Amino acid sequence: MAAFTNTEFEFGGINHLALTCSDMQRTVDFYTHILGMKLVKTLEFTHDSGSGQHFFFDVGNGRDAIAFFWFDDAPPPRAGDRAIGPLAPRGPTALGYRRHGSRRAGCAA
């Protein structure tokens, strides 16, 4: 891995990673009830063509988060459209965490 070479400012990590979702309630249910993550912040907002929500889930260290936007006027998702790969937690129990969440969601681990 290359050494950190930025001399202009100190990079202190990532505050949050923001994604979009098509159903905020299903997203909240999955991250809180299946994975056991804490919902730490919610925002409701309006924009030029509608309204939306922005919810934040603690990733386990009390500092960083994964966040989701939901827009009431968003088009339906399409396969491959702005898709990302799976998110993988870090830590000694990461594999057990993923297996636990997968089993609770009814998926093969």
Image (cartoon, rainbow, N blue to C red):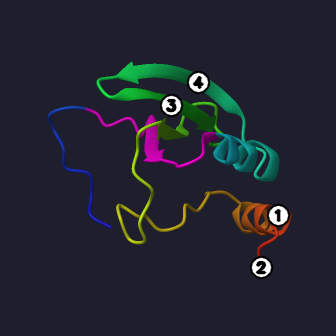
Please, what is the dominant secondary structure of the magenta stretch?
loop
Give the farthest residue toward the bottom: 108
For badge 4, the amino acid type reads Thr
Estimate the spatial distance between the alpha carbons at disc 3 and disc 4, rounded to whole Å. Answer: 6 Å
Query: Does dot 4 land on a helix, a strand or a loop?
Result: strand
Image position of 60 (left or right of 97): left
For badge 2, the amino acid type reads Ala
**Which quarter shows the N terminus?**
bottom left
Query: Does dot 1 land on a helix, a strand or a loop?
Result: helix
Identify which residue is drawn at 81% across, 46% down.
Answer: 33
Residue sitting nearer the eye, 13 or 17: 17
For badge 1, the amino acid type reads His
Q: For marks 4 and 1, give the one nearer the viewer.
A: 4
As for residue 30 lying within the magenta part, the answer is no
Crowding at label 4, few (<14), some or many (≥20) Cα neighbours within 10 Å?
few
What residue sits right under mark 3 in the picture? 54
Residue 58: percent from left, percent from top: 63, 36
Residue 27: percent from left, percent from top: 64, 47
Quarter-wise, where is residue 104 in the image? bottom right
